[in-house]
Image (cartoon, helix red, strand yellow):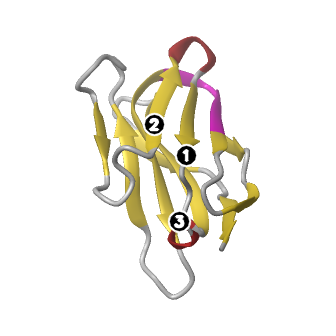
Amino acid sequence: QVQLVESGGGLVQSGGSLRLSCAASGMIFMINAMGWYRQAPGKQRELVATIRSGGSAGSTNYADSVKGRFTISRDNARNTVYLQMSSLKPEDTAVYYCNADIRTVEGTFSNQYWGQGTQVTVSS
């Protein structure tokens, strides 16, 4: 079994910063891309940022709405992905979900795994 556990959400004022973390655990053979998605009330889940397994420059992708404000990174030794969020706006308020493409020790192919979500609330 694989688990993704997020942490770091909370309440912050507009213009503030937060750092989200997501640690993957279990019978992991390899983690490919990792990413963050978010879902605001009454809206569909949307991509925030992704990062490929290499983690090198050019391996990241961001939604236009967060470019220049959010930074995704990963620590492969810890099977952890981070999302540094700065200059937060009220419209960033949402539940943030971690996602990872993981091949398990017993698996032949990789599968998508999701965390339970962490609430981020930005007050105006």
Q: CA distance from mark 3 to mark 1?
A: 10 Å
The span picked out in magenta is 21-29
Question: In the figure, residue 63 lies in which quadrant?
Answer: bottom left
Q: Secondary structure at mark 1?
A: loop
- The first of marks 3 and 2 along the sequence is 2
Estimate how packed mark 1 is, as few (under 14), some (14 to 19) or many (20 or more) residues with alpha carbons within 10 Å. some
Task: Provide the major secondary structure of the magenta segment.
Answer: strand
- Looking at the picture, tell me which residue is in the foreground, 87 or 118: 87
Whether tag 1 and tag 2 are in contact, CB under 8 A, the answer is yes
**Where is mark 2, residue-wise?**
71
Give, as a three-letter code, the residue at label 3. Asp
- Measured from the top left, where is residue 100 in percent x and y? 46, 40
Asked if residue 17 lies left or right of residue 43, the reply is: right
Residue 2 appears anywhere in the view: no
Residue at left 51%, top 88%? Answer: 42
Which label is found at residue 86? 1
- Looking at the picture, tell me which residue is in the foreground, 27 or 86: 86
| Front label number (1 vs 2) | 1
- Measured from the top left, where is residue 115 in percent x and y? 61, 51
Give, as a three-letter code, the residue at label 1. Ser
- Measured from the top left, where is residue 79 in percent x and y? 58, 23
Asked if residue 119 lies left or right of residue 45, the reply is: right
**Where is mark 3, residue-wise?**
92
Q: CA distance from mark 3 to mark 2?
A: 14 Å
Q: Secondary structure at mark 2?
A: strand
- Looking at the picture, tell me which residue is in the foreground, 84 or 116: 84
